[in-house]
Amino acid sequence: MHALPVFADVVAAAARIKGRAHRTPVLTSRYFNSASGTTLFFKAENFQRVGAFKFRGATNAIAALPQAVRQRGVVAFSSGNHAQAVASAAQDAGIPATIVMPEDAPAMKLAATQGYGAEVVLYDRYTQDRQAIATAIANERGATVLPPFDHPDIIAGQGTAALELFEETGPLDALFVPVGGGGLASGCALVASTVAPDCAVIGVEPAAGDDARQSLAAGHIVQIPVPRTLADGAQTTALSPLTFALMQKYLRDIVTVDDAALVATMRLVAERMKIVVEPTGCLGVAAALAAAPRWQGRRIGVLVSGGNVDMTRFGQLVQATQPAGQ
């Protein structure tokens, strides 16, 4: 097992990715502030390269590899955002990338991954082990496996999103962060523990896939079947030893949001803020709005983790949905 990353690793990651990853905007909304009774700061990672925060971790992990190792290429497994991130970061670095993706991955994410020059290997997420497939490919080719969250350089890279947020906003009372495998949440919680120790970092999972909530309650990693949820970026079955240890140490709480709330939030964010956010990216927004009565008058951060949703699918989802809170 790798050593747990520390705050200095996030600072080093920020230096490595500077000029490669975007420093994404922090958005505010008079409507959302009024409706919630809080002051909300949205860290808009839907404007990150490849449309999601994952580019941070992938870029940092590849840059941190020794030159000789890096040139042999990388292998990743992902439902979409990590896939695109590794493919794009590898293209930037001029190295080969192979991505193991589920057959039912969103079409736009599959096309984008291939568009960045990566070789894509498809698998059945409900019957096959993606990590085993990736490991076999890496062993055959002498490449390095870059998992979506179980790696200190990935976690440190994701934590740079929170580092930028706190640099812009100053201390916050709470920070809502989506949770899949926990790379983003653990990295953000690690940052908050140093730069804003009074900030309550709250992880947000889809209701159909609450393995992190179960794990923190049980005191050990709980594995669940592949969750069936619109939040495809959070269809993980378990945390990793690294993310679990960091979340157990630094996370204040875990809450869940059902798919109906995610779709309603997608529509509301599009209508009021004029931005497109994917279902997984709406986890933190939906949870912050639901928790607003407990945070009246407080300053709340929200990690909007990504915006990669097919427009046809987006239209289908929001067409007959009433906006959240109405």
Image (spheres, rainbow, N blue to C red):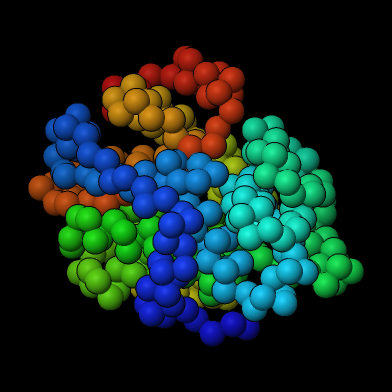
Residue 213 visible, this angle = no
Q: Is residue 47 left or right of residue 175?
A: right
Residue drawn at 52 percent across, 18 percent down:
315
Q: Position of residue 312 (x, y in %)?
A: 59, 20
Residue 307 visible, this angle = yes
Q: Between residues 73 and 83, which one lies in front from this camera angle?
A: 73
Residue drawn at 55 percent across, 61 percent down:
59
Residue drawn at 44 percent across, 19 percent down:
321
Q: Position of residue 26 (x, y in %)?
A: 28, 46
Image: 132 above or below 122: below
Q: Is residue 97 left or right of residue 183?
A: right
Residue 37 sits in quarter? top left
Q: Position of residue 57 (x, y in %)?
A: 52, 62
Q: Is residue 136 left or right of residue 258?
A: right
Residue 64 sits in quarter? bottom right
Q: Is residue 170 left or right of residue 234?
A: left
